[in-house]
Amino acid sequence: MDQPLAYVHVNKDRFLAELAELIAIPSVSTDPDRRDDMRRCAEWLVAHLRSLGMDGSRVISTGGHPIVYSEWCRAQDAPTLLLYGHYDVQPPDPLEQWTSPPFQASVRDGNLYGRGAMDDKGQLFTHFKAIEAYLRTAGRLPVNLKIVLEGEEESGGDSVSVFLADHKHLLEADLAVISDSAFFAEDVPSLCYGLRGNVYFQVDVQGPGRDLHSGLFGGSLHNPIQALSEILAQLHDREGRVAMDGFYDDVLPLASEEREAFSRLPWKDDDYRRGLGLAELYGEAGFSTLERLWARPTLECCGIIGGYTGEGVKSVIPSHASAKVSMRLVPNQSPAKIASLFEHHMHSIAPRTVRVTLRCLTRAEPSIVPLDSPGVRAAVAALREGFHKEPLFQRDGGSIPMVASLKHTLGVDTVLLGFGLPEGNEHAPDEFLSLSNFFGGIGTVLHFYQELHSSFLEYRHRWVRSISGMSAQKG
């Protein structure tokens, strides 16, 4: 391990210069004018992976943006790791709020700024540079490695899902890793082992066939905005619980060791409240804030549309109103079941004076990885070596649909080995990645590959011994 780590130290400046080249490509997947830049980014990645010594590196065309595939599978008696990431980035708007140009990487105050620095180009580069350090010094990797990089993560495309389903044999692996998440806080290395799922609906309320004069028609019909507000107000009870029959039936309770892990995190409700500019926190009664954020399901109204909202006065009863409703789900909850429960509940409380229609826009499965799995054990040991601190465990309230896709399609668990910071401004102006986390991340990935090799061998040996013991007992 000394030689790869020394190689990283000597080549730090070059690593940053190469990452700056990647950040300079405006690979914004939602912008149709950037299609050529998307392919140029994919081709840059393929050329870079080839230069590192990876095999079979190629751009794969899809119905949307291209996929990048690469592999190094020459390690005998070693596990196979699948690295997933994305090379597309969010739009940089509003441009005037950037301190430096979004596609011109800039180093300030120990951070690397630029669109994609944290999400996800910078975090992907921790793996690329660990690969380079191994292959340039040891001439080999401790694990077999397959890499899949997509270009539609930020735009909701499904090309990678189709690719996974069509290439199951090619992508066979023992474990997957995604580096697209954050530490709990600065100088607090942590490992995320659970994600919430999501069910997202649009609720449309239709009243009269056209907008009506509020003076001439007011009082004779149910205003769609009022009807929608009354419906939304019935979705929670006074204790902050979702008022929907069956919503909590399948919720997986927190294990005692998880509560203990949460208690070790440097968390203070008052700091969190002040940081949000709130007088009081709110949520489901009977649970801590971290439990409500990570381990309890929620229902939130994310937007309301209806009526006249311009300057001045326009006395109108709108013909329709709509709302966006997001439900975050926890392990054991089924998005399909929750969607069905929501539809039934909404129709049961909808007034007869309006017509309510529902559209399910997205669904994502929740996910959780056992804390004693070989991948998690390897990641914990690697973080300890990479950042010289004992890592903590956390869940995350957000969703990464790919984690569930990898499990359902390929049958592999995923380790979320991220190196960002919660304040890293992903999706916002002045996105950044801490340089100490970037280089610490490279060291962590170096150790992770080695620890994964040892962890899986130990797991296999235990499994073989258990099978041998069972056979002896039967004999």
Image (cartoon, rainbow, N blue to C red):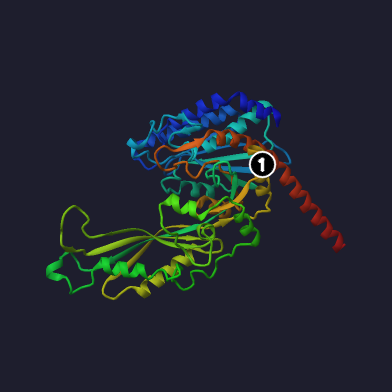
Image coords of residue 246 (percent x, y):
49, 72
Judged from the image, the secondary structure of the residue bearing numbered disc 1 is helix
Q: Position of residue 456 (x, y in %)?
A: 71, 46
Query: Which amino acid, mark 1?
Result: Arg
Residue drawn 60% across the image and 62% down it: 254
Considering the image in quadrants, where does the C terminus appear?
Answer: bottom right
Q: Nearer the viewer, residue 311 or 456?
A: 311
Q: Residue at x 65, y 62 (%)?
A: 256
Q: Quadrant of residue 178?
A: top right
Rendered residue at 43%/59% (across/down): 280
Q: Is residue 423 above or below residue 12?
A: below
The residue singled out by tag 1 in the image is 384
The front one of 344 and 223 is: 223
Report x, y in % for residue 399: 49, 53
Residue sticking out furthest to the left = 216
Residue 143 appears in the rendering: no
Q: Would you call the spot at circle 1 few (<14 residues within 10 Å), some (14-19), or many (20 or more)? A: some
Q: Image quadrant for the N terminus? A: top right
Judged left or right of residue 278, residue 160 is right
